[in-house]
Amino acid sequence: MQSGSSSETEKLTAIDDLSGMCLGLGQLARRASLELQDLSTAVKNRWLLACAKALRESTSEILAANALDVARAPEYGLTDAAIDRLIINEKRLEAICCSLESLAALPDPVGEILSGSTRPNGLQIQKVRVPIGVILFIYESRPNVTVDAAAIAIKSGNAIILRGGKEAFNSSQAFVGVMNRVAQQMGIPEGALQLVPTVDRSAVGELLKLSEWIDLVIPRGGESLVRRVVQEASMPVLKHYDGNCHVYVDRLADLDKALAIVVNAKTQRMGVCNAAESLIVHRDVAESFLPKLHQAMIPFGIEFRGDDLTKRILPDAVQATEEDWGREYLGPILSVRIVESLDQAIEHINRYGSRHTDAIVTNDIASARRFTVRVDSAAVMVNASTRFNDGGELGLGAEIGISTDKLHARGPCGLTELTTTKYIVFGDGQVREG
């Protein structure tokens, strides 16, 4: 597909048989998924490397398509954070290409033998990692995610149907167009990578009915999108709703490290799910730590919303409400609570957190261990920023999303998380008796 103008985008929404179109996507993806299961690692890696090369060579095409999306962003009422996520520039495009190359260097999980045994009757049992099959990926205004999701899906042997937001439609078209041109040259089966050719919201509902053809749906976006998918999906859903991430500064914390970690966790990129939204500080260090943090946050325009003790230390802090403790701000607001103990901090996180990412800053090993065991989150950081809960940062190459579910995957979802298992049994004529 080539990137299109806004008029072309509108034209693509006018599909007479939306149900039939979605069914066709699912059926084509199913056929492709069966071929992908037998595709060699070498072919998949060559495709990833060739995609990185082709994307670099298509820089002008991709940036032009992205410019169309950015120009229309005000029509959609996007926040500054959302527009930042939408923008593709040469630096971000190079990062996307490097991610593809990193993914090619990772081991292929497909075919890995997880366990094996021989039964008394001679049957040889193997538990083997295999692709899930067909993935439906629904996401909002993050065009770089188009590439990450496509790459992870195909490297792990899955066909993928991409349904991106209208805000990034032209950018996604450009990316998928380049990757599919390379796919044709590399022997990737037709239908392995498909972009839904409409921004009509009704297409999502039609796709979510196709449990016969689609094995898993992954929504990545705002809470309203995720809840709609969960409500309507006829197939399993891998998801997280929001990212109310905490940093707890313990009474035995190195306060210089704590300052750097909190500033990074909150301000490095505010509009993402692993940014810190809530700060908890032990009472013993609050009076020395909070004024330094307040000063460090001035250049970023951070508004503090705190409890009574916080307001005594920081007079310009806004009084926090019950709603503030559980909010994902995705912007320059930080809730602050002062606690009397580690256990009180843990209790606060487990009550108000979103089970996404939470961090402790401490020099006490016992406190760190108790925090990591008792905090019920997909990722728990010790003396490190919440921003590290990311597939690339954790060595997964890239991610298709972060799950706060407990089945079947939790945390950043990379290659392994898009696989399941099957048992392969080798016999020599054995029959079951009794």
Image (cartoon, helix red, strand yellow):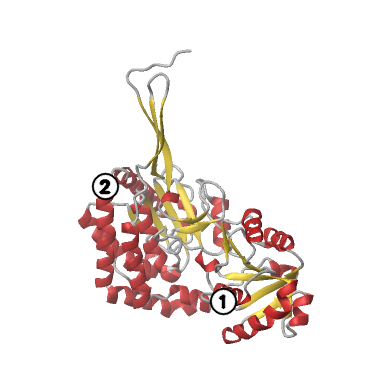
Query: Residue at (50%, 74%) from the top-left corner?
Result: 82
As displayed, is residue 130 above or below residue 178? above
Residue for point 37% across, 49% down: 158
In this view, which residue lies farthest toward the left? 185
Q: Is residue 77 visible?
A: no
Spatial distance from mark 1 to mark 2, Cα to Cα? 45 Å
Image coords of residue 55 (percent x, y)? 28, 68
Asked whether 312 or 285 is in front, the reply is 285
Label 1: which residue?
260
Instruction: Judge from the rendering whether residue 267 lies leftward or rightward of residue 149; answer left or right.
Output: right
Of mark 1 and mark 2, the one earlier in the sequence is 2
In the rendered image, is residue 152 in sight?
A: yes
Instruction: State the SS at label 2.
Output: loop
Q: Nearer the viewer, mark 1 or mark 2?
A: 1
Q: Nearer the viewer, residue 362 or 241?
A: 362
Residue 209 location in percent, x, y? 48, 47
Per the image, the residue denoted by label 2 is: 40
Tell how many labels. 2
Q: Is residue 434 above or below residue 169?
A: above
Image coordinates for residue 190, horizontal then vertical, percent: 27, 51
Q: Is residue 296 above or below residue 30?
A: below
Front position in the image: 375 or 406: 375
Residue 413 rendering spot, x and y as whole percentages? 46, 55
The 10 Å Cα crowd at callout 1, few under 14, some 14 to 19, many 20 or more, is some
The residue type indicated by label 1 comes to: Ala
Identify the residue at image location x=66%, y=60%.
367
